Image (cartoon, rainbow, N blue to C red):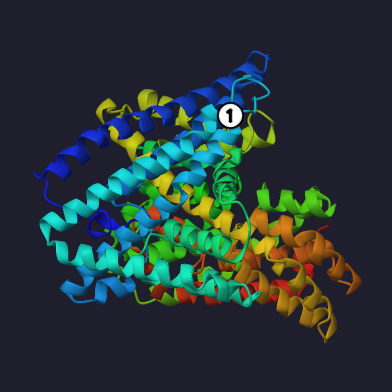
């Protein structure tokens, strides 16, 4: 999701002094961010070549990549903030009058600044504490890595101030001053109410993680900042937790090496488009299915199934598919909102397709055979995919294709030969993982190398002048996604510390109605949890608690794992809180307001499919 350049960070005269400073600082941030994308690609690809070709592994490659990645995530977040590309919900803002909209935009900017101001000192303390730690492979101070957090947050603070001056200069100081008063008033009210929160117990979870987080989202405050404000408020006002812990949890959420696949697959998607591979692939697919109503929507469902799980990150999977399919689908009249809704729905549908990092995590924390989970995950995704295709058929059955002629078979064959290198890319990537050539994180670098060679040698299309802007765009989009993941991880940690997880497990163990009721409540509970927790933290948190209960009730481990994963996928990709939905909007460069209507039908189909999987165990365990 992009704020679109009409959003919270997109106002201001281009000739004012704040605009000139903004442009100058922007270059100083964008160039390092672009170079960091290149550096991470180079380090990981060198690791693959060294290990698989030279049989001499680089022991330091993953560690260096991790250090560079945190800097990339933070500088990418700065670029996204400067360009107005942080993810936000603007349904209410867009319907307001021009005067009120100016006020809401200013409130959103000030709220971002408030969060950055509150975490500035904790971020510095966290980085200072990391100075004493020495990295195992490179043997350097971990401060080189942790410094990315205070530096990135500080730069975002600078650009936020510049944006406020630009908003005031272009419009007037009135909405800016009103916004400052509103945000300061709300913050003061919460601070003064701190003694009251002490006696509210777990009701504070509703106040902060539903009230504050939801209020921020609907007010148009960028999602990552809204999650951060809710978590900071909860921990600062209702607990005695040291505030640097918030920054530590953000670091943890943004630092999973598997997430490095996000920027690399974003860049790979842009590369596929630039080299002409996307056009070749789409030309063949359009020739093959162009005469079928909703044909390319079926292609999207199938393509997500093919590439799902390769990278270990659903955002990376979507980033590999959307740039290749969306332009042609829009050219054929598909609405952007419907496209991003289907993209998000396929993200939820394919959560169980191996090699799924969530399934691997379930196996590791519960002792279930990962091979059994991989086998059991294939058919549930097919069932949900069939239901999504049913919705596609229903929506496109009246599509006017009278002007579309069926492509002759000879022409389809010719286009297949041209497109074969592009069509082979998903299979090359999957084979590299299966054969052990590369890890799920490294495999995107093989895709990048393959695409460069195909663009230069086969399609003869590789305009070097586009590489720089593509790298900056990769950093910006990745930063917008990763900031949300970081603050969502901090929120998940806050929920854990509240004792909410153990309370939920105890309540579910005491449910009447046996296994059917347990499965029904599990679907509802994990759908809600999936909207606020990333899959892996939720599994680590609840897996050891709930899987033993399922076994006692006679529910097969693999069967229950499929129900849990699919339910979390529903929550993860469902607006208004689902992080995956906003990632899909960001990747598709579509305002989230446009996708909310169309996604309802797809989510209903996924819910029905999840219920079917839950109450027909054979779908999950029939091939074990």
**x, y percentage for residue 323?**
38, 48
Q: Is residue 196 left or right of residue 518?
A: left
The residue beneath circle 1 is 131
Judged from this view, the residue extending furthest toward the bottom is 512
| Residue 115 screen position, x and y as percent | 42, 55
Pick the residue in front: 312 or 372.
Answer: 312
Describe the element under mark 1 as helix, strand or loop: loop
Q: Quadrant of the N terminus?
A: bottom left
Quadrant (top left/top right/bottom left/bottom right) for the C terminus: bottom right
Q: Is residue 333 left or right of residue 581?
A: left
Q: Is residue 328 visible?
A: yes
Q: Is residue 512 above or below residue 4?
A: below
Which quadrant of the figure has residue 549? bottom right
Please determine whether, in this image, residue 512 is positioned above or below residue 144.
below
Q: Is residue 118 above or below residue 239?
A: above
- Residue at x-position 45% and y-position 39%: 150
- Please give left or right for residue 571 compared with residue 623 in the image: left
Q: In this rendering, would 541 be left or right of 297?
A: right
Q: Toward the viewer: 523 or 194?
A: 194
Q: Position of residue 480 (x, y in %)?
A: 41, 49
The image shows residue 394, relative to residue 451, as above or below, that is below
Rendering coords of residue 252 (x, y %): 60, 44
């Amino acid at each position: 999701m992009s704020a679109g350049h009409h959003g919270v960070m997109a106002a201001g005269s281009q000739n004012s002094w704040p605009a000139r400073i903004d442009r100058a600082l922007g270059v100083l941030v964008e160039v390092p961010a672009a170079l960091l994308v290149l550096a991470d690609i180079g380090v990981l690809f060198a690791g693959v070549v060294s290990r698989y070709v030279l049989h001499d592994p680089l022991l330091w490659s993953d560690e260096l990549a991790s250090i560079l990645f945190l800097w990339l995530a933070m500088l990418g977040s700065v670029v996204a903030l400067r360009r107005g590309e942080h993810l936000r919900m603007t349904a209410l803002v867009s319907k307001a009058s021009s005067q009120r909209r100016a006020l809401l935009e200013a409130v959103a900017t000030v709220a971002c600044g408030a969060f950055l101001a509150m975490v500035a000192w904790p971020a510095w303390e966290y980085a200072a504490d990391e100075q004493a730690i020495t990295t195992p492979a490179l043997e350097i101070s971990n401060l080189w890595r942790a410094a990315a957090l205070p530096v990135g947050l500080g730069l975002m603070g600078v650009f936020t101030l510049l944006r406020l001056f630009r908003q005031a200069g272009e419009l007037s100081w009135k909405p800016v001053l009103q916004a400052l008063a509103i945000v300061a008033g709300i913050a003061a009210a919460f601070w003064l109410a701190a003694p009251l929160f002490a006696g509210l117990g777990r009701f504070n979870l509703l106040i902060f993680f539903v009230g504050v987080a939801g209020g921020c989202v609907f007010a148009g405050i960028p999602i990552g900042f809204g999650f951060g404000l809710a978590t900071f408020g909860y921990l600062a006002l209702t607990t005695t937790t040291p505030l640097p812990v918030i920054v530590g949890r953000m670091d943890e959420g943004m630092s999973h090496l598997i997430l490095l696949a996000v920027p690399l697959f974003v860049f790979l998607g842009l590369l596929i488009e630039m080299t002409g591979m996307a056009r070749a692939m789409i030309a063949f697919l359009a020739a093959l299915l162009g005469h079928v109503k909703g044909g390319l929507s079926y292609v999207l469902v199938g393509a997500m199934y093919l590439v799902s799980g390769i990278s270990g990150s659903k955002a990376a999977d979507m980033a590999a598919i959307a740039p290749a399919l969306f332009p042609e689908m829009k050219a054929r009249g598909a609405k952007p909102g419907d496209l991003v809704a289907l993209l998000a729905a396929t993200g939820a549908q394919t959560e169980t397709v191996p090699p799924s990092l969530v399934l691997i995590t379930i196996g590791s924390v519960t002792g279930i055979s990962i091979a059994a989970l991989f086998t059991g995950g294939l058919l549930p995704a097919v069932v949900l995919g069939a239901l999504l295709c049913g919705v596609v058929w229903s929506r496109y059955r009246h599509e006017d294709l009278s002007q579309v002629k069926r492509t002759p078979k000879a022409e389809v064959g010719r286009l297949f030969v041209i497109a074969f290198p592009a069509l082979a890319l998903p299979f090359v990537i999957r084979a590299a993982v299966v054969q052990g050539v590369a890890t799920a994180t490294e495999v995107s670098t093989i895709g990048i190398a393959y695409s460069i060679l195909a663009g230069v040698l086969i399609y003869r299309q590789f305009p070097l002048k586009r590489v720089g802007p593509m790298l900056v765009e990769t950093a910006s989009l990745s930063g917008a996604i990763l900031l949300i993941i970081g603050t969502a991880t901090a929120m998940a940690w806050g929920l854990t510390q509240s004792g909410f997880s153990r309370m939920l497990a105890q309540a579910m163990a005491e449910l009447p109605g046996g296994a059917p009721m347990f499965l029904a409540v599990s679907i509802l509970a994990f759908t809600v949890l999936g909207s606020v927790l990333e899959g892996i933290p939720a599994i680590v948190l609840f897996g050891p608690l709930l899987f033993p209960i399922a076994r006692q009730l006679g529910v097969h481990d693999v069967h229950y794992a499929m129900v849990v994963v699919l339910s979390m996928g529903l929550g993860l990709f469902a607006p208004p809180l689902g992080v995956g939905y906003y990632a899909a909007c960001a990747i598709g460069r579509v305002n989230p307001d446009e996708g909310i209507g169309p996604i309802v039908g797809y989510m209903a189909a996924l819910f029905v499919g999840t219920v079917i999987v839950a109450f027909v165990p054979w779908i999950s365990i029939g091939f074990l």
